Amino acid sequence: GENVEQHPSTLSVQEGDSAVIKCTYSDSASNYFPWYKQELGKRPQLIIDIRSNVGEKKDQRIAVTLNKTAKHFSLHITETQPEDSAVYFCAASDSGGYQKVTFGIGTKLQVIP
Amino acid sequence: GAGVSQSPSNKVTEKGKDVELRCDPISGHTALYWYRQSLGQGLEFLIYFQGNSAPDKSGLPSDRFSAERTGGSVSTLTIQRTQQEDSAVYLCASSFGTAGELFFGEGSRLTVL
């Protein structure tokens, strides 16, 4: 089955700096890579996703990159703000197949004002 | 309703009692997941239902845990003879297919005394 590794487990940055979270996956059949944000006491919510036919996707201050050859994908947050403080989860799945979504362990991001 | 609904939102029980947690997914969503999240921890996969296929039960921690999904809609997670280590938030999520956004419920917080 799929295995998703995520690092770092915790990350502290100064407000305004950038934050990068990295994930690797094991199953070459995976082709859908979402990222979820979970604020304290709340449910996880999708913030951005990328499919294997593109290498990069941006949405305002967040971007994801995907390297299918190396089986790496990353989340980049620029100009971080205190409200970006949360736990971020990467995930992988195989669209069109039966494979369930597999999550990484999560990264706790703290943005220091 | 428009979202994933879980009940009860909070459950306090005594060690050794059985509990049932309910999840009502978004109408038309074929995939349904149960996760367990202990305080400050990641998303521990429990079980996955996809359409009419046999469920993936590989994450259930012991035979005290079981789940069913009736008519491809509502799901019930049952924990028999609860133990203190079962205390956690149990999250349900649903999606349309295997590579769409996962929508999470608010969770059921279980406390075993």
Image: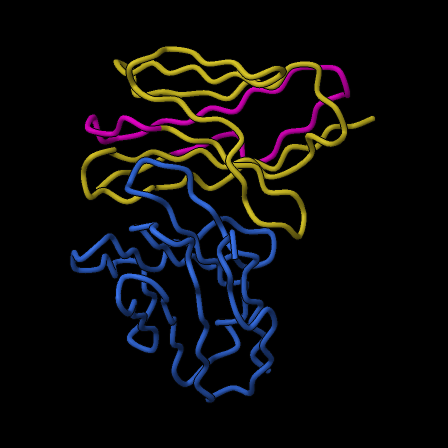
Farthest residue, direction top: A55
- Residue B27 to residue B79: above or below: above
Give residue B97's quadrant in the image: top left
Residue at the image point whose x is 70% and y is 20% from the top = A80
Give percent across and percent down for residue A82: 76, 29
Horizontal relation, residue B76 to residue B90: left or right: left
The question of residue A22 being in magenta is answered with: yes
Residue at the image point whose x is 69% and y is 28% from the top = A12
Give percent across and percent down for residue B36: 46, 59
Residue at the image point whose x is 51% and y is 86% from the top = B15
Q: Quadrant of the C terminus of chain A?
A: top right
Q: How many marks?
A: 0
The question of residue A67 being in magenta is answered with: no
- Residue A64 to residue B62: above or below: above
Give percent across and percent down for residue A67: 33, 14
Give residue A62's quadrant in the image: top right
**In the figure, the blue chain has which letter?**
B
Q: Quadrant of the N terminus of chain A?
A: top left
Residue at the image point whose x is 49% and y is 63% from the top = B90
Give percent across and percent down for residue B108: 54, 66
Q: For chain A, what colour was chosen?
A: yellow
- Residue B47 to residue A44: above or below: below
> What is the basis of the colouring in this image?
by chain
Q: Nearer the viewer, residue B81 or A84?
A: A84
Give residue A70's quadrant in the image: top left
Look at the image and give the residue range highlighted in magenta.
A5-32
Horizontal relation, residue A72 to residue A27: left or right: right
Q: Nearer the viewer, residue B49 or B37?
A: B49
- Residue A109 to residue B14: above or below: above
